[in-house]
Image (tube, helix red, strand yellow):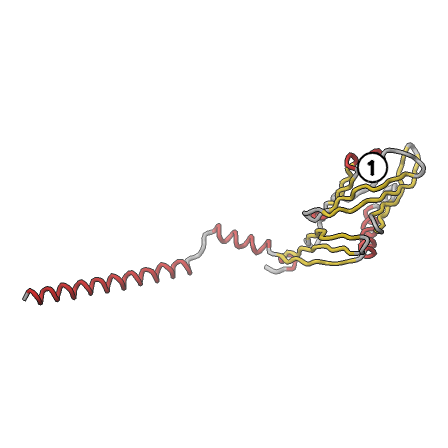
Amino acid sequence: MSTRNQRLKEKNKWKKFFYSLLALNIAVIIIFTVLIFWPGSQRDIALNEKNVKEASSEFFVRTTKKNLNDLINTYLAQLQKDTEHQYQVSLEDDVQLIGELPVFSTTVPLAVHFEPLVQENGDIILKLRSISVGLLELPNKIIMEFMKEYLSMPEWVTIIPNDEAIYLAVTEIEMKSNFKVAVEHIDLEANNLVFKINVPYQSLGID
């Protein structure tokens, strides 16, 4: 009799163990199902939407001095409409700015040579190499102060007389297409100019 009772107890123990294990497996399955199909929080949804909006592709465009020169001077011609003092840019072995400048109640020819230095963020610093205003002999800083005052420049161009340089914030140029431009590499002597174009998917109507 005692042996039979022991067998029954042992059998009941295994049944409890089996049902406990079964219940545990069912609970695990339910938890995983909930985690997979449960909708994310509003914060997660907002972050996902932000990632989609900010998604973009980058393209590297290689061009020549002539192509860039034509583009620059077409842009400058539009910018300088109805302005009194004109200038142009010429890309040779360095960057040359050629035009005219009012100095001491007269207008004199202006010729400036710059070395382009590409910055890590894709902007450019034009570092002064040489500068002249006709036959006048003036300090470089004074001439650049006249340039800053009288020459019409785009908003993203800053003349810095104290540093004898011009800062070109290329990455801040606003385009109707919403594309973003950065300078990757410039070697004027080798006629090798590379730009990085960032194209947001939203600008192409891709949601």
- Give the labeled residue for mark 1: 144
Picture residue at 90% right of the left edge, 38% below the top: 133
Q: Where does residue 70 sit, x and y in percent of width and height?
A: 83, 54
User: Is 95 rendered above or below residue 28?
Assistant: above
Q: Specify whether 199 is left or right of 128.
A: left
Q: Residue furthest right?
A: 135
Q: Is residue 65 above or below residue 10?
A: above
Circle 1 sits in a helix, a strand or a loop, which is it? helix
Using the rendered view, name the quadrant where residue 128 is placed: top right
Where does the C terminus fall, quadrant-wise? bottom right
Residue 39 x/y as whole percent: 44, 57
Q: Nearer the viewer, residue 88 or 186?
A: 186
Give 16 or 87, whichever is nearer the viewer: 16
Q: Residue furthest top?
A: 104
Crowd tier of the residue under label 1, counting other residues whose Cα lies within 10 Å: few below 14, some 14–19, many 20 or above: many
Q: Nearer the viewer, residue 87 or 16?
A: 16
> Left or right: 41 with respect to 141?
left
Which residue extends farthest left? 1
Give x and y (percent) for residue 105.
92, 33
Residue type beneath disc 1 = Met
Residue 171 falls left or right of residue 42: right
Count of numbered labels shown in the rendering: 1
- Which residue is farthest front? 190
**x, y (%) of residue 190?**
80, 56
Asked which quadrant contains residue 98, the reply is top right
Query: Which of 78 and 129 lies nearest the eye of the viewer?
Result: 129
Q: Split into 4 quadrants, where in the image is the N terminus?
A: bottom left
At a point 29% along the width and 60% down the height, the residue shown is 24
| Residue 4 occupies quadrant | bottom left
